[in-house]
Amino acid sequence: MTYSISAEGLALVQAHEGFRAEPQPLSESAWVVGYGHIRAGAPGAPVSESEASQLLSIDLAPVERMVNAHVTARLTQAQFDALVSFAVSV
């Protein structure tokens, strides 16, 4: 079975990451914006919450694939959401 993050799981990640409209410096060559989205190089433009949600969905896609590929046990939706949230924060 292939799982996808639920609306509740997405809200969990958003709450944990917090929203940043303006890019914040992460290092000399990286910036964080939206809900934990990393930009390399220039800081770029601010984002709206809608744009940040789209970026988060794009950022979570490879994490969802990784959890689906490596967890073979049956999971509840809440368990899958928690694993994705944990994996994206590591």
Image (cartoon, rainbow, N blue to C red):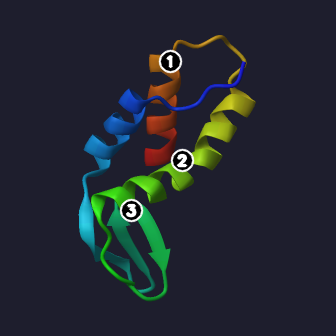
The Cα atoms of the two marked residues, 2 and 3, are separated by: 14 Å
Q: Which residue type carries mark 3?
A: Glu
**Which residue was labeled with disc 3?**
51
Q: Are marks 2 and 1 in contact (CB under 8 Å)?
A: no
Q: Which residue type carries mark 1?
A: Gln
> Badge 2: few (under 14), some or many (20 or more) residues near its Cα, within 10 Å?
many
Determine the residue positioned at 25% across, 64% down.
20
Where 34 falls versus 57 (above or below)? below
**Which residue was labeled with disc 1?**
77
Where 53 falls versus 64 (above or below)? below
Q: Are marks 2 and 3 in contact (CB under 8 Å)?
A: no
- Residue 48 image point, x, y percent: 29, 65
**Which residue was labeled with disc 2?**
60
Q: Earlier in the sequence, mark 1 or mark 3?
A: 3
| Picture disc at residue 27 | none
> Badge 1: few (under 14), some or many (20 or more) residues near its Cα, within 10 Å?
some
